[in-house]
Amino acid sequence: MGMLKKEDAMQFQKIHGQLLRKHHLFSALSDSDLTTLMRGTRVLSVGKGEFLFQQNEEARHFYFVVSGCMKLFRTLPDGTEKIIELVPSNQTFAEALMFNAQTMYPVSAQAVDSSELFSFSNIDYMALLKRSPDLSLVLLGDLSRRLRMRLSEIEVLSLKNSTHRVVRYLMTLIVDSDSEYPQFDLPVAKRLIAGQLAIQPETFSRIVHRLKEEGVIDMKGKEVTVLDRKALANYE
Amino acid sequence: MGMLKKEDAMQFQKIHGQLLRKHHLFSALSDSDLTTLMRGTRVLSVGKGEFLFQQNEEARHFYFVVSGCMKLFRTLPDGTEKIIELVPSNQTFAEALMFNAQTMYPVSAQAVDSSELFSFSNIDYMALLKRSPDLSLVLLGDLSRRLRMRLSEIEVLSLKNSTHRVVRYLMTLIVDSDSEYPQFDLPVAKRLIAGQLAIQPETFSRIVHRLKEEGVIDMKGKEVTVLDRKALANYE
DNA sequence: TTCCCTTCTTGATAATCATCAATTGGATTT
DNA sequence: AAATCCAATTGATGATTATCAAGAAGGGAA
């Protein structure tokens, strides 16, 4: 956990350069720009349950998840936490903050599983941005997409009852769009899913129970099978 | 409602140039760029209750509200509508879509009151953007701010009970932050506010009733007076 | 003004969901 | 294997909120 020396940096880039390249934040960078950026990069290990940063701390860095899973949440006035986002590997978070100087993290970041992260300096990245207008356009597209994602979340939270929210959530996990009996794994613990949907774990459990009873889905642990796709869609 | 001729365009800019200049989307533009942009501008009048565009139509334009008020909403599966945003005068909407080619409007836009709008071509604005990198940075900052606003909305929707949501909403309307008995008007009909908070109008009415009974606020029509600021804040 | 229409309010009831409590299940550690 | 810990489930209960219904109030239009 610390700044990389020159030799390490070269090694670092050799190993992880391609990894980052897949991400849109870095795919448009020239080789030399990427090298420059990585000079200020840190590699962090965050143990399960450990905090990376707290809500209202000044945002000086953004992060890339190499492995593990991070939880971004807000603490509500009554002390409970509202999960805003679960960030899996190969994704960045907190990068949207760099465009406004001296802003605070609007969420706290905690490791759901032990995680490896890259940390990037906002200032360094912004310097790159000023030199490459094309990159700005890529980022604008990215933020715009995120904005629409949040719209969907707002919509989910406005759905009349919890069953609708759970069903809507399950639908988003169906990737194999052609299969008649889609199968997938829940990406995180049920407790966390319930948190994202703003319902209690007990309620989540009961809803799943009912869906199983009605033969719409099957669920064993984290393995989900959709048994009646139409019925599931009709809940919406 | 139509494309402006050359003379009209000059007149148009003379009159409305300053108006637009106040908005961050246009404040960073050079005079010549603004003129160019306005060549493709249309002036629209939308009657109360009329639609400007429907959800899932292709997004080719974004808009500036000169006067009136627009409602952006999504239609939920059960046919009810979820209000995403109420856009008052001197604000833009749907501009975040232009950064992704061929996207659809994720909401429908309807006039709450009779409204006057400017419409801007996404393509034209994007052309400007490619020529002025500084403008991109301004926009990035703007989108980033919006993203955090959505976060707050998500938080509000996650608040345990409706009273919290109403109180939180009222708090955001207090502008005169120093006054002991802040006064303000509700910006739109109560029915619409309830929609934004994802509660029923009846529930909203009852909560206000209780707050009045407890001497925390007073409300006559749309006029609101906060009588006990601490008590109001303590609901959170 | 009067009429009409929509919003707002208030009441009664039913549905939904959170909470509390206790148990089961699974995974990891010793 | 036993012990431990946390997640998940299930049941019972109470609080909250939606729904339905009916009346009051407000704002325009004729």
Image (cartoon, coloured by chain):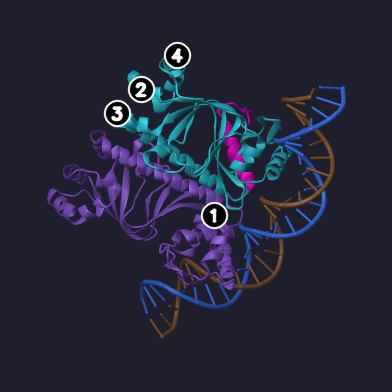
Chain colours: A cyan, B purple, C brown, D blue
Q: Name the residue under label 1.
A: B198
Depth order, front residue of D24/B67: B67
The percent position of residue C8, horizontal first and vertical second, equals 51, 69
Measure the alpha-carbon separation of dots 2 and 3. Answer: 14 Å
- In the image, the segment drawn in magenta is A162-186
Answer yes or no: do the residues labelled 1 and 2 have beta carbons within 8 Å?
A: no
Q: Name the residue under label 3.
A: A132
Measure the alpha-carbon separation of dots 1 and 4. Answer: 52 Å
From the viewer's perspective, is A68 left or right of B29? right
Q: Residues within 10 Å of mark 3 (few under 14, many from 20)?
A: some
The percent position of residue D2, horizontal first and vertical second, equals 87, 27
Q: Are the numbered discs 1 and 2 placed on the same chain, yes or no?
A: no
Q: Residues within 10 Å of mark 4 (few under 14, many from 20)?
A: few
Is residue B129 rendered magenta in the image? no
Secondary structure under tag 2 reads helix
Mark number for residue A36?
Answer: 2
From the viewer's perspective, is A174 left or right of B29? right
Depth order, front residue of B68/A15: A15
Amino acid at dot 2: Thr
Mark number for residue A11?
Answer: 4
Task: For marks 2 and 3, give the one nearer the viewer.
Answer: 2
Which chain hosts label 1? B
Label whose residue precedes the other's in the sequence (4 or 3): 4
